[in-house]
Amino acid sequence: MPGSICDILPSAAAALGVPGATDVLGLVERLGDVRRLAVVLVDGLGYHLLPQLAPDAPLLASVLAGTTGQLTELACTFPSTTPTSLVSLGTGALPGEHGVLGFTVNVPGTASVLTHIFWADDPPPRAWQPVPTWFERLRDAGISARAVLPEMFIGSGLTEAAYRGAEFRPTAKGEHYAARLAAEVAAAPGLVYGYTAALDHAAHVSGIGSPHWHTAAAKVDALLRHVLEHLPGDAALVVTADHGGLNVPDEARIDLDADPRLRAGIRVVAGEPRVRYLHTEPGATADVLAAWTELLAGRALVQTREQAVAAGVFGPVREEHLARIGDVVVTCGGDTAILATDHEPPQTAQLVGFHGGLTPAEVDIPLILLR
């Protein structure tokens, strides 16, 4: 079994001397003596995408060839989506424990759907996501833990859920992000966290393999090279991702809102196109399950909430988080995506690249160690 995104910050904390932190990934042995760690998460940098972006990314190509750094394969959590993965990274906990169980989820007891990337303070982040973060644990151990993030992220619900306890270093639009990240690493021992969304944005908007995506890959590589070239001698760079992705062709798209058979009996639609959470009208779960199972045979796994939880895909689920998962959970296979044009912004249906499911292309992520 490969390690998981949940193991990265505990292992980093162990490498920095935090008592009680478990070094599952063997960073102490693999990095040697370090006093500073830069952990950079590249949104959308799936493990299986590395060969495709290597022509535009000399550092990552060198890592892939085995001539620079150390590359291992990890897995993200499920759903393989940014909010869930960021909180699993920050807490070291599986989604069933931390409760950020998808890109969007129904707020139990309401008809509201919470989109985690646009979450402000309702519901309150500490109540919605109760697990302590490793930034808090580093701080409590007297080790500096800083997060260099775009200023628009600071104070959001997702930032608080994933990174609370960090000393935030906001960056302005147009600021040289790599230089700011490198300067923060040089400024003091401890952990510095960085994040870039450029590759994921290009994959969604233009598709994996598009010119836009290759341009983004070159920019990401330049960012990582800058940080690496400016590392102090007692520092290391750890690069990872939150998920991979795949392109979904037009013929593989199903619009649940265009098919009365799929729409019947559904009260609230949440999740995202690769993993749908269907909250059903009272008494309708069996009918919804039967209709979706028949209509999506061979294209998606259709389960009750109980079946999905029992399968362990979320890890153990806290009782108070169960209702955030749909009565019916639909996990797409192959390159299928389920749109919900009456329930989501029109931009969602225009996206090219998607993720969220359980395929290796979506779940497998790299762990890259560089000195």
Image: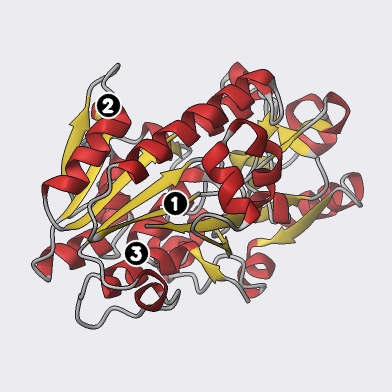
**Between 62 and 310, which is closer to the camera in this rendering?**
62
Which residue lies under the disc numbered 1?
239
Is mark 3 in CB contact (under 8 Å) with mark 2?
A: no
- Residue 41 position, x and y percent, is 42, 46
Q: Write down the quadrant of residue 350 in the picture.
A: top right
Q: Looking at the image, is mark 2 or mark 1 nearer the viewer?
A: 1
The answer to whether marks 2 and 1 mark residues whose Cβ atoms lie closer than 8 Å is: no
Secondary structure type for disc 1 = strand
First in residue order: circle 3 vs circle 1: 3
Residue in the picture at 61% in, 72% down: 312
- Give the crowd class for mark 2: few <14, some 14-19, many >=20 residues within 10 Å: few
- In three-dimensional space, the C-alpha distance between marks 3 and 1, rounded to whole angstroms, equals 12 Å
User: Residue type at mark 1?
Assistant: Val
Q: For the residue labelled by badge 2, is the local secondary structure a helix, a strand or a loop?
A: helix
- The amino acid type, in three-letter code, at marker 2 is Met
Q: Identify the residue under disc 2.
A: 152
